[in-house]
Image (cartoon, rainbow, N blue to C red):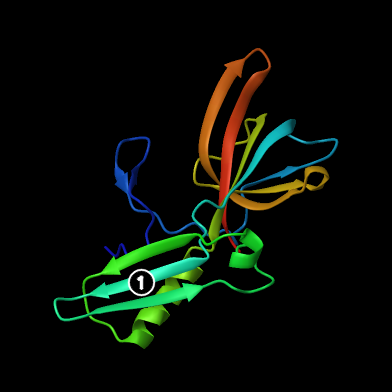
Amino acid sequence: TQTQGARAAKTDQYGRIQLLKPIDYDGDPVWTFAEGQNATFLDEAEDELDASKVCNVVVAVFETEDATVVGTATDEAPASPWSIANYGRRKVAAYTFHNSATQAQADAKAKELLDGTRSIVHRVTIKHVWCGARTGDIVAVSWPSVGISGKFAIRRQTIEVGTGGCITTSELRRFERV
């Protein structure tokens, strides 16, 4: 079996280990949570953007017994919200590699790593009636009055059974590039 590009291994409801394909956020959603008269979710949500891993300076250090080469990449783009000027300070990430590289290779690796930190987690937690969507499924949210829209993967769910039926709390997540 080929596992390259697979998500982290998990178990299904029977305890069997599964390697799943990466989540396709462009795929068809299994459910749409749409604002309006027939909405199937409560009028409250947690909307979080986790940009804690975004850096504006990356240092790539290539070390061998014979030499050390340091590559750097910085975000100085005026339009970038994470640039040094717009963020107000340098937020540095350093990576060490134990092999040789030229200065151009070290700088290219630092640029690649800087670009790789530009993925932020957009997390939305909503309560809704049970709809059949399960953990790992793609759902769409169309809630223009609070500015939440797009396709998300269901990361976690809890279901409460009560007199009003099954109220499900779903943590939805997607990765956005900045």
What kind of element bears circle 1? strand
The residue at 42%/58% (across/down) is 21
The quarter of the picture where the N terminus appears is bottom left
In the rendered image, residue 132, in percent from the top left (x then y), is placed at 58, 37
- How busy is the neighbourhood of tag 1: few (under 14 within 10 Å), some, or many (20 plus)? many
> Between residues 8 and 161, which one lies in front from this camera angle?
8
Name the residue carrying label 1.
Answer: 60
> Between residues 27 and 44, which one lies in front from this camera angle?
44
Q: Residue furthest top?
A: 163
Q: Residue furthest right?
A: 37
> Which amino acid, mark 1?
Ala
Relative to 109, residue 43 above or below: above
In the rendered image, residue 167, in percent from the top left (x then y), is placed at 63, 25
Relative to 7, residue 99 above or below: below
The residue at 59%/73% (across/down) is 76
Is any part of residue 83 visible from this angle? no
Image quadrant assignment for residue 95? bottom left
The residue at 63%/35% (across/down) is 131
The residue at 42%/75% (across/down) is 72
> Between residues 76 and 157, which one lies in front from this camera angle?
76
Image quadrant assignment for residue 168? top right
Relative to 66, residue 46 above or below: above
Q: Residue furthest left?
A: 65
The quarter of the picture where the C terminus appears is bottom right
